Structure formats: C-alpha cells, structure tokens
Amino acid sequence: MTFRSYFLLLLLLAGSRGLRAQQRLTGKITDAATGQPVAYASVVVAASSQGTTSNAEGEFELPALRLPARLIVSALTHVRDTVAVAAGGPLSIRLLPATVLLPDVTTGSYTAELLKKAYRQLHRSYPQKTYAHAFYRQITRLDGAATEVQEMIWDAKTSSAGVEGTALAQARYAEKEALVNFKNFSFFTKAYSLYDTKADSSASTAVVSLNTARNYTLSVLGVTQDGPRQLVEIGFVSKPDVNPHNYRGRLTIDEASGQILRFQLTTPDSRSRSNNPMFKLQNPATTFELVFEFNPTGAARLSYVHIGYQTALTRPFRDAVQVQTSSFTYFYDGQTTPASATYAPASATQADLATIKKTTYNAAQWQNNPAVKRTPLEEEVIRSFEQKGAFGTLLSH
C-alpha cells in the first residue's frame, strides 16, 4: 500500500467515525410524580444552537445528534434537568414537578400590580422583534374522525406579545368530503396578540392592561421556583358587567422581570356561524395558549401557539356532530435580524387553502423534516392521507 492510499484510507476511516457519531435520537419526557407526558418541553443540546420541543405526548426527536452530548430539558412548572447522552436509542426523561407554593396574599393589590408590571414590560419590549421559522399544523375532526389536515412552514416575525407577520415557505393540505371545513383557521394564530399598540390603555379591556383588576376577578393559583426565578400563576375571570364574553384562563409571569411566559384563555365563541342556514352550532368555544421563553435581555421570545375550537353541529332530524379543530405552531431558529421575506400581517379575508394551492407540493421536503412535530395519533392520520395520495390534492371520497 502506498503512502498516498494509506493516507486516503485514514481519511475515510475518520469520516466514517464522524458519521457514526451523528445519530438520530428519540425520547419521551414525563412527569416524575405522575408519569404523565410533559407536552412542549424544550430540549436543547448544550453548547450548541441545536434543539427541539416535545410534542403533545412528550415525545421528541433530534435527527442528527453528535454523541456524546448533554441535553438541557426544561418546561414551565417543572425543574430544569441536564441529561448526559452517550449512546443512541429511545431516551426516557423524567422531570421533577416544581414545588408549588400558595402565598399568603392571593387577591387584591398583589395580582393587580403584577399584571400592571407585565403590561409595562410588554410596552417596553414590544419593539424588540424575533425572526424565526415556524411549523403550523391543523387537524379537523368530526365525531373523532380526521377530515382535514393542513401543515405549513412559515418565516415568522414575532414579538413578546405574539405573531407580527408571516411569509409562507412550504405547505400541504388534504381533506375528505365532510359537512364542514375551516377556510382560515390560521388567522387565530397570526392575529392574537397580548398587546395592542393602538388601544387606549386607560379604557382597554384586555387581560394584560392597566385596568385588569377593574375588568377581571383575579387570584393567585400558585408560585413555582425555576432556579433563581419565581414564577407566579394568576387565574382570571371576566366580570359580566364589564366584559360579556366570559373570558377565563390563567397566565404565568416571571415576578422579577414581569415577562409573561404562558397565557391561556378560553371563551365562548358567539360569532361562530355556518354558511349553511340548516346548520346550527351549539356551545362553540375557542381556547388560546401562547408560551414564551424567558429572555434576560427583556423581550420574551414566542415558543409556541396552540389554538383549539369545538362545537356541536346540529341539523334537522339528524344526530348532532361533534366538531373539533386544533392547531399547533412551533417557532424555532429565532434571530434578531429579518430574513429576505415579506412578513404579511394576519388577514381575515385570506383563505388558507387558496394560498396553499399557489404553492408547489414537494413530498421530499416533508420526509424526516426536523421541524415537523406530531403525536402518534397525528402521525397515523398523516400516514393515512399520504397512502391515498391526498396531499397536494383534495380527496373526493
């Protein structure tokens, strides 16, 4: 063997060792006390920009992890943990629940002042924007059976209050013939914001405002310790004489900075209508959940948005049909500088399907895409559509 060929062999061996060191890692995160999945937990590879988020079942995947590695796993209401990974294979991570304290002061000025602090922090940090990629998934079910699937990848402009604008990068859509579908459900994700720059702060009825105590009944649900930070969870219910929409929910605030880290709201959706006059919607309700990552620079970064809608659809002489639609949007690779994209604001008149039809469906781009996150049930739904060649077309049967 010549010196040159021996040198080339060494290079090939070195390269093969490097390839073996990069492995696909899957795992599941559960609560150490209850055994229940920890949904949407953050999984970050230490000393790198690589990371992901667990899905609704606590499952996560890192498609190309260089081993050995250390994973930093965190979730609100749980104790942050660092996990050493030496080999591939399914990983089971159990997070300890954070200790929940009930302070002596649960009502009155404490909650009102903390929400005022959160409002002022939003006002200061709102101009700081983050430019990220986002994966959006939407599934509609009628009586539990999936009838509509929609997935999009956006370039997104976000703030510490919500989504500012999006630009479509990839998309796909499939549906079965069904009684109902949703033409623009992504509007809820794109349009909902915790802060309105044009609103009169003295007259605002928003949950996060200077007037929260006047418009809502407030209570402290608990206080958890997240390392050096103290997180306060506040429950709110709208007062009927001020806000007839019957808003109720909870939010989590970092006590020291005033950053809002989680916002959850449920409200009856009296504006829901069907374009079929024979259809009636009973007890429609919409839920909103926005989760942000703590940022010591002063502007919390949007991590994910979850929207859910449910109602019972009634027709003359027929059984009611249970309608459920949910969407989940995960934001990743955030930067402070914009990409070469035009970030369009939310539009109530723009139909998702019409926009998706203008794109070219590329099946290869969706295979093993690390941005795509689904539960096993959702994966089963997607697989059934793919087997029928539904994506990029519409099912007629």
Image: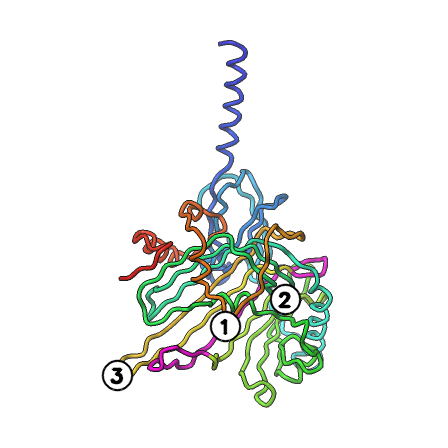
Q: Quadrant of residue 381?
A: bottom left
- Of circles 1 and 2, which is in front? 2
* Closer to the camera in the image, 32 or 206: 206
Q: Residues within 10 Å of mark 3 (few under 14, many from 20)?
A: few
* Amino acid type at image mark 1: Thr
Left or right: residue 363 versus residue 79 is left
Residue that numbered label 1 is attached to: 287
Residue 219 x/y as whole percent: 62, 79
The outermost residue toward the top is 2
Image quarter where the C terminus lies is bottom left
Q: Residues within 10 Å of mark 1 (few under 14, many from 20)?
A: some
Residue 215 x/y as whole percent: 63, 84
Residue 276 on the magenta segment: yes
Q: Quadrant of residue 176?
A: bottom left
Left or right: residue 24 versus residue 133 is left
Residue that numbered label 3 is attached to: 317
Residue 4 x/y as whole percent: 54, 13
Residue 6 on the magenta segment: no
Determine whether the residue tagged by mark 1 lies in a helix, strand or loop.
Answer: strand
The span shown in magenta is: 272-300
Q: Earlier in the sequence, mark 3 or mark 2?
A: 2
Q: Earlier in the sequence, mark 1 or mark 2?
A: 2
Residue for point 39% across, 66% down: 140
Residue that numbered label 2 is attached to: 161
* Closer to the camera in the image, 253 or 379: 379
How far apart are the two marked residues, 1 and 2, measured between alpha carbons? 17 Å
How far apart are the two marked residues, 1 and 3, measured between alpha carbons? 30 Å
